[in-house]
Image: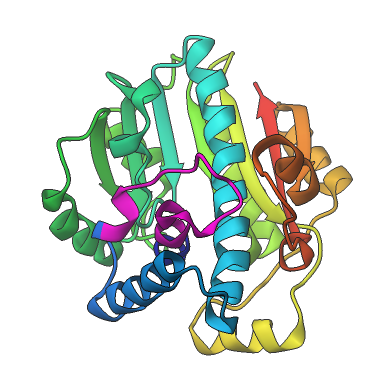
Amino acid sequence: MMVAYMRAVADAGASHVRDFRDPTARVFLSEKGLERLTKIEAQLNSGRETMRLGFARVAADMMALRTSAIDSAVRDAVARGTTQVVILGAGLDGRAWRMTELAGVRVFEVDHPATQGLKRLRVGALPPSLADVTFVPIDFEHESLDTVLARAGHDATRPTCWIWEGVVMYLTPDVVRATLANIAGRSAKGSTLIVNYHTTMRGALIRLVLRLMGEPVRSKWTPDEIGEALSAVGFSVLEHSGVEEWAKRYATGKVDMRAGRVMWIVVAER
């Protein structure tokens, strides 16, 4: 919900990524989230810079930049002929409803049944998805990724674009490596893997807040470490990029990047 809110704020125009659009994000917000968004929009329309708006801009920038970088990698994969996408921990992701490049592409959204239940209630307010969406519920304590994807109709003989965004930092290194092995087992030659990871732990206060929310940070990776983990399962790194590079590519104006320096994305190919 927090991620959807930040995307919605960016879509409202608070981000320095001027052409960022995600009209799906608003649909996923709670009543309280919509109230906060309405206040931000009012401040944007008034032209008044406030502390609330300043904090909102920073959060919106980080999410718009991260989202734009991943979207670009997905477009590249589809342009190379990929016809199926798997989003691990899809949450309230809106790509299947907003990315025209995914028209006709098979998109598998993998997540906890409770999260998917909430999402499926909300997507009825959106226009029909551009992609062919399959919701893949999974209980990681009792089911394997390989099993649920095979049951859902994922074709391991065709190239897949995998999106793993906003999840790795909450998993232990052993679980990350095991998941990479599962991904590799269902990745035909030509598959693309996009992984969002953290290079350092966040500050103590943010870690405490996340722990209280039930999402403690459990791992950090250097580019070399994540590259070695990918290589071990047969993926070759195409690119590592961080917020400074994303700002150069997608932003106009000065972006406060301090909060986002821990975020990185690696794009790898099978």
Q: x, y (%) of residue 174?
A: 68, 58
Q: Quadrant of the N terminus?
A: bottom left
Give the image quarter of residue 109.
Answer: top left
Image: magenta residue range: 7-26
Reply above or below: 109 against 160: below
Closer-to-camera residue (244/53)? 53
Give the image quarter of residue 29.
Answer: bottom left
Q: Is residue 105 left or right of residue 9?
A: left
Is residue 155 visible in the rendered image? The answer is no
Magenta stretch encompasses residue 68: no
Give the image quarter of residue 209.
Answer: bottom right
Q: Is residue 9 left or right of residue 270?
A: left
Q: Quadrant of the C terminus?
A: top right
Residue at x-position 78% and y-position 41%: 245
Q: Is residue 175 left or right of residue 248?
A: left
Magenta stretch encompasses residue 9: yes
Residue at x-position 68% and y-position 32%: 267
Q: x, y (%) of residue 30?
A: 26, 74
Residue at x-position 24% and y-position 37%: 134
Is residue 133 visible in the rendered image? The answer is yes
Q: x, y (%) of residue 104?
A: 27, 18
Reply above or below: 191 against 268: above
